[in-house]
Amino acid sequence: MTIEIVVRGRNVDVDEQLEADARRKLAKLSKLASDIRRVDVEFSEVRNPRVADSQQCEVTVHLTRNLVKAHAAAPDARTALDRAVEKAGHQLDRVHDKRVHRSRPRHPGPASGPPSTTD
């Protein structure tokens, strides 16, 4: 199954190299969850000279019944992308752990066999 990856910039031009890097890095997230339907990546810039981490990246991963969002800021767009992908990976790990944990029974049933009597 192919994942739809949408890369866009909000008031920022996204060059082909950055878009290719984003697609390559986000394709690796499919190893963490098999039900990823779509991944949105949005680059933006804070236009304030006092803000050192002016480049921002927001990654939204659409799963079957969940939505994972990760946001990161850095001095350059590639570092912001790396940080956001790392955060999204951690969140996908947590979603996976919850799914595995809940697939098992929460409370074990009573022990099988007749009740023991002590005289």
Image (spheres, grey):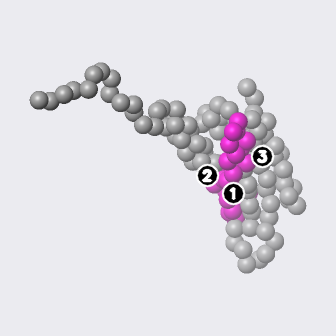
User: Looking at the image, do the residues carrying marks 1 and 2 touch, with CB atoms under 8 Å apart?
Assistant: yes
Q: Is residue 73 magenta?
A: yes
Magenta span of residues = 60-85
Snapshot quadrant of residue 61? top right
Residue 38 at what x, y percent from top left? 76, 39
Residue at figure coordinates x 88%, y 61% from the top left? 11
Against 70, is 97 above or below? above
Can you identify the residue that label 1 sits on? 71
Against 115, is 45 above or below? below
Q: Earlier in the sequence, mark 3 or mark 1?
A: 3
Assign a secondary structure to mark 2: helix
* Quarter the C terminus occupies: top left
Q: Amino acid at mark 3?
A: Asp
Residue 43 at what x, y percent from top left? 79, 56
Residue at figure coordinates x 77%, y 49% from the top left? 41
Rounded to the nearest angstrom, the CA distance separating label 3 from label 1 is 12 Å
Can you identify the residue that label 3 sits on? 40
Residue 78 can be seen, yes or no:
no
Q: Earlier in the sequence, mark 3 or mark 2?
A: 3
